[in-house]
Image (cartoon, grey):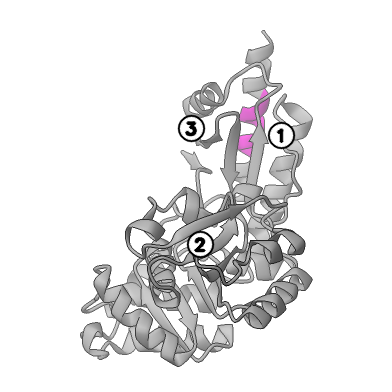
Amino acid sequence: MIDLRSDTVTKPSQIMRDVMAKADVGDDVYGEDPTVNELERYAAELLGKEAALFVTSGTQGNQAAILTHTRPGQEAIMDEDAHVFVYEGAAISAFAGVQSRTLPHIRGEISMETLKEAIRADDVHYPETGLIWLENTHNRSGGAVLNQTYLKDVHLLAKQSRIPVHMDGARLFNAAVASNTSVRDIAQYVDSVQFCLSKGLGAPVGSILAGEQTFIEKARKKRKMLGGGLRQAGILAAPGLLALKSNIQRLAEDHDQAKRLAEAINTYTDLSVNHEVETNIIVADTHESKMTAPEWVNAMNEKDVAIIQYKPEALRFTTNLDVSKKDIDAVIEKLKDCSRKADD
């Protein structure tokens, strides 16, 4: 099976399994796991932040950030397709007691005029604006990369308004590689950032939350509240550290594969990829296709290719390190075959 459902489906390499088996470990709740400590130091340095925290998932990292930045009754500004709003089980309201203020966007970017207007005035009727939320890359926009100028503008507005900015950077390294910049250059414009080790970087589990030292100290307690107090976690941290040291630049291969696949989809099928493919995510519309999204999923699954229905009339293909150039060649042929059968 060629699995294009997500970049979370990759299997740890033998080298990763070896470093897991040999990892030096201790009790992380006591701060005594040397491998976790090394991962957190290394990640903080990469991001240009004072400190970092190893968390079990991107959702846990995001929720720890919300709990640390805000207090119940406040409001968080975000785009209407933000992962934290769509895919995290309403945890922002259930755990933090924070209201989501969702706004229209273009490829993850809310217009500065709209963003400025959304910041609440000091009025007894309104919630306080407690946080501005960004997502980079932007998942539901097909892995779109936020522009650096936009990030700078949001940073300046937030600073003037004394509102913290958090970035859900689940695929932050994809954004950095695609824009030929560094994660440090991106992260300089936010107060905190979360990124996943278990997506494009290929580690089996885990994410990183980074920010100022005092922020991370508070977030560590929030992680504990969320059930994230870890013991001999070096076994999980070791492959994450290896991924950071070995798998960043290779993300460009996934991006190239995605662009080639998107071109083939537009050329050989009646699906439509209407967005610029910048990173490793392709969203293909089925509006004008002879087959529905579920029919496409089933047809490709019968040909040993796994994709997902992403929206009512859209599919998602996600390239990843377990999918080779030869695999993409095979997927293209299978897409052609499905299209021919749909025409018959």
Other residues around mark 2 within 10 Å, as few (<14) / some (14–19) / many (≥20): few
Q: Residue at x 67, y 71 (%)?
A: 176
Asked which secondary structure carries label 2, the reply is loop
**Does 134 sit above or below residue 160?**
above
Quadrant of image for the C terminus = top right
Circles 2, 3 touching at the beta carbon (< 8 Å): no
Q: Which residue is tagged 1? A: 265
Residue 142 visible somewhere in the drawing: no
Which disc is residue 125 wearing? 2
Residue 65 visible somewhere in the drawing: yes
Is residue 88 in the magenta section? no
Q: Which residue is tagged 3? A: 304
From which residue to which does the magenta span run?
329-336
Asked which secondary structure carries label 1, the reply is helix
The amino acid at mark 3 is Asp
The amino acid at mark 2 is His
In this image, 307 relative to 148: left or right? left
How much space separates mark 2 and mark 3, taking CA atoms? 56 Å
The amino acid at mark 1 is Ile
In this image, 291 relative to 261: left or right? left
* Pointer 1 or 3: first along the chain: 1
Which one is closest to the eye, mark 1 or mark 3?
1
**x and y percentages locating residue 152 in the rendered image:** 73, 76
Q: Residue at x 65, y 44 (%)?
A: 282
Q: Residue at x 76, y 49 (%)?
A: 276
In this image, 253 relative to 309: left or right? right
